[in-house]
Image: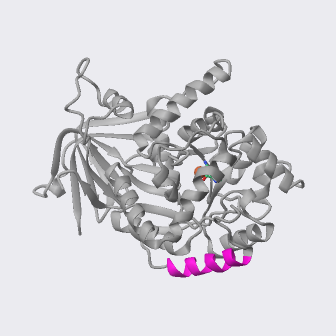
């Protein structure tokens, strides 16, 4: 049996809005599964090696439920256009470079290592439409210790990223065959968004999702021009979500990014089907999409998680994504005549950790039975206004971290990063 015992100030989010803190606590995992969090070390572990991090914070690591790996090279660039123009001008040309497998290897190994070094251990990620580059992405994530789902994308940028329905179908099957041996990174069907898929392709993917029990990710109601296009393409559907539902792509294993303009009816459809909405606050602001009604979704019982959505989003590190979601919720409050509450730090933290992990069938917080996904965060180099509680220290970490703050990361029970080298 392998045993991991991590000692420090253990802080976790067991429910939306609550942070449990245990200074000098022990987080114990056996064979990669959490056994418990203890104030003193249980007798049975006496004499076992303990990783003692002193007063440092021991936190849940992050789940980033929406990001585009082939947009990583353009991170921080080209945010002067709204969605559809932005895709044509920046995203599609950048993604087209992933026809080159050497380039894919170089970029994806860097992305995987940056994710892990910054505490993101679970993802739902878009690749490009290139099957070979997608397999390289999965390999690099697995090697670095990032777990979760990756989808070979499909899209219709004439001359750049074209694939016929038949090619897409064939390549999807080749990709699914080729990725069977990955242990921690699994395939996810990824109809990029309704306008990039023919009806036949949507029908094929829906059937495949049902036959092979595969999860699905896409985009929903992000931008009003996009929504108008969808209405034009599917006049028989009253709302955007119905274009997915019609083809069997709207289930409890479906993840939909953005949902900025989802009204009460669309949100109800999400709740009824158990679809997870992924809030991508940075992206929504950068490419002028709008401000998503996250509080309404939470109040109505819709599942919500957070996504960096790089490179519409300009922050890959999830501490920053939490801060962005809190800021966006304050803008939403103002737009809603001060009638909706903004997200608190404990709520934002829950969405980036426990809520994302829930998609991977984990219980909230450091619950016994969960796979060990954790990070160590040092903040001893920052000035303090007064002796700070663990909750205050987390609040500050969301907005401000010292250089090299993340000292160690565990993913799926394994230590995958150590700042000590
Ligand atoms: N909708 C379709 N493709 C994309 C993309 O790459 N980024 C964002 N933000 N929205 C999309
Ligand atoms: Fe996206």
Quarter of the image with the N terminus in it: bottom left
Q: Which residues are magenta?
A: 166-179
Residue 376 image point, x, y percent: 26, 45
The image shows residue 400, relative to residue 76, as above or below, that is: above
Place of residue 148 in the rendered image (x, y in percent of width and height, measured from the top left): 47, 62
| Percent coordinates x, y for residue 55 in the rendering | 19, 36
| Rendered image quadrant of residue 45 | bottom left
Residue 24, image x, y percentages: 20, 39
Task: Judge whether residue 175 is colored magenta.
Answer: yes
Q: Main secondary structure of the magenta part?
A: helix
Above or below, 369 against 399 in this view is: below
Q: How many marks?
A: 0
Instruction: Answer with left or right where residue 363 lies relative to residue 239.
Output: left
User: What colouring style does the render use?
Assistant: one colour
Compare residues 308 and 238 and report the one nearer the observer: 308
Query: In screen coordinates, is 304 left or right of 162?
Result: left
Q: Which residue corresponds to the image point at 52% horizontal and 48% vertical from the top-left?
A: 311
Q: Would residue 129 be found to the left or right of residue 186 on screen?
A: right
Residue 184 visible somewhere in the drawing:
no
Residue 67 on the magenta segment:
no
Instruction: Identify the residue shown where x is 71% and y is 62%.
Output: 249
The quadrant of the picture occupied by the C terminus is bottom left
Residue 237 left/right relative to 214: right
Can residue 135 be seen from the camera position used here? yes
């Amino acid at each position: 049996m392998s045993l991991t015992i991590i000692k420090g100030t253990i802080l976790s989010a067991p429910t939306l809005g609550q942070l449990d803190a245990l200074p000098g606590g022990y987080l114990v995992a056996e064979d990669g599964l959490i056994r418990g969090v203890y104030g003193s070390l249980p007798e049975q572990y006496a004499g076992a090696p303990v990783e003692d991090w002193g007063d440092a914070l021991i936190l849940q690591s992050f789940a980033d439920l929406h990001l585009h790996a082939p947009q990583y090279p353009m991170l921080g660039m080209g945010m002067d256009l709204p969605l559809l123009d932005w895709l044509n001008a920046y995203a599609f040309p950048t993604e087209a470079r992933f026809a080159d497998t050497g380039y894919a290897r170089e970029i994806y190994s860097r992305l995987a290592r940056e994710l892990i070094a910054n505490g993101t251990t679970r993802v739902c990620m878009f690749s490009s439409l290139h099957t070979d580059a997608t397999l390289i992405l999965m390999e690099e994530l697995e090697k670095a210790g990032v777990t979760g789902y990756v989808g070979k994308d499909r899209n219709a940028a004439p001359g750049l990223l074209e694939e016929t329905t038949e090619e897409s179908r064939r390549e999807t099957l080749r990709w699914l065959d080729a990725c069977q041996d990955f242990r921690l990174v699994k395939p996810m069907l990824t109809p990029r968004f309704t306008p990039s898929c023919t009806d036949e392709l949507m029908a094929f993917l829906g059937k495949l999702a049902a036959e092979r029990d595969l999860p699905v990710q896409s985009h929903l109601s992000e931008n009003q021009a996009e929504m108008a296009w969808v209405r034009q393409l599917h006049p028989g559907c009253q709302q955007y979500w119905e274009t997915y539902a019609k083809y069997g792509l709207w289930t409890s294993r479906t993840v939909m990014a953005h949902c900025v303009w989802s009204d009460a009816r669309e949100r109800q459809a999400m709740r009824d089907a158990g679809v997870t909405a992924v809030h991508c606050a940075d992206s929504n602001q950068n490419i002028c999409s709008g401000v998503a009604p996250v509080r309404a979704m939470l109040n109505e019982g819709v599942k919500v998680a957070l996504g960096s959505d790089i490179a519409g989003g300009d922050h890959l590190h999830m501490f920053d994504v939490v801060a962005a979601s809190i800021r966006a919720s304050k803008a939403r409050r103002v737009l809603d005549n001060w009638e909706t509450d903004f997200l608190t730090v404990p709520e934002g933290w829950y969405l980036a950790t426990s809520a994302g992990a829930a998609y991977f069938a984990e219980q909230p917080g450091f619950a016994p039975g969960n796979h060990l996904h954790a990070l160590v965060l040092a903040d001893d180099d920052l000035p303090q206004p007064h002796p700070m509680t663990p909750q205050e220290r987390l609040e500050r970490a969301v907005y401000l971290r010292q250089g090299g703050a993340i000292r160690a990361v565990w993913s799926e029970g394994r230590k995958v990063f150590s700042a000590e080298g």
